[in-house]
Image (spheres, rainbow, N blue to C red):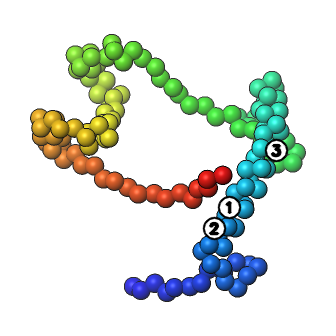
Amino acid sequence: MALKKKAVEAPYQATITIEQWANLYESFNAKIKALEKEMKPAKEALLNYAKEHREKFEDNKLRFPNGVYIECRNRMVDSYDKDAMSMEWLNRFIDNGGEELVDVKFNTKAISETEKDAVAKMLQEIDYTIEVKESMAVCTEK
């Protein structure tokens, strides 16, 4: 299926060049950064108020009449002595019913750089592959 090329249109101009889009983006980005800087004291005041008035939260939200609200979010963070978790300990943990409680994660960058044949062969046994996924971001240098 062939894609039709269409000029990019802005509401205030018939057509605009990519360089003009870049200039427009940079201009908007500068304004956003300035507004975020202005907004910072208000955000800090709201968060401090929320910390001091937890009793006013309903369903993890502290709502203001203008539609602004502060949401209290929770996440679990674990910690443990990584040096104490040996392979022997991990095997005992799994043998005692902990197999569904363990996630194995590989260090992809380190694996991609390894020169150990034995490791590479073992990874082949589980059909381990590395795929490079590309993403793009619009950035400014200012």
Secondary structure category for the residue under label 1: helix
Pick whichever of labels 3 and 1 is earlier in the sequence: 1
The quadrant holding residue 42 is: top right
Where does label 1 land, which residue? 26
Residue at (73% x, 55% y) in the render: 30
User: Label 1 is placed on what type of residue?
Assistant: Glu
Where does label 3 land, which residue? 38
Pick whichever of labels 3 and 2 is earlier in the sequence: 2
Where does label 2 land, which residue? 22
Residue at (25% x, 40% y) in the render: 113
| x, y percent for residue 140 | 61, 55
Asked whether 140 or 44 is in front, the reply is 140
Secondary structure category for the residue under label 3: helix
Quarter of the image with the N terminus is bottom left
Q: Badge 2: few (under 14), some or many (20 or more) residues near its Cα, within 10 Å?
A: few
**Above or below, comparing residue 120 to residue 87 in the picture:** below
User: Label 2 is placed on what type of residue?
Assistant: Ala
Q: Badge 1: few (under 14), some or many (20 or more) residues near its Cα, within 10 Å?
A: some
Q: CA distance from mark 3 to mark 2?
A: 24 Å
Q: Badge 3: few (under 14), some or many (20 or more) residues near its Cα, within 10 Å?
A: few
| x, y percent for residue 111 | 26, 39
Residue at (68% x, 34% y) in the render: 72
Residue at (22% x, 45% y) in the render: 128
Do the residues bearing badges 1 and 2 touch, measured as CB atoms within 8 Å? Answer: yes
Please identify, in this view, whether the residue under mark 3 or under mark 1 is nearer the observer.
1
**Above or below, comparing residue 114 to residue 77 in the picture:** below
Q: CA distance from mark 1 to mark 2?
A: 6 Å
Q: CA distance from mark 3 to mark 1?
A: 18 Å
| x, y percent for residue 67 | 82, 48
> In the visual, does 90 lie left or right of 119?
right
User: Label 3 is placed on what type of residue?
Assistant: Glu
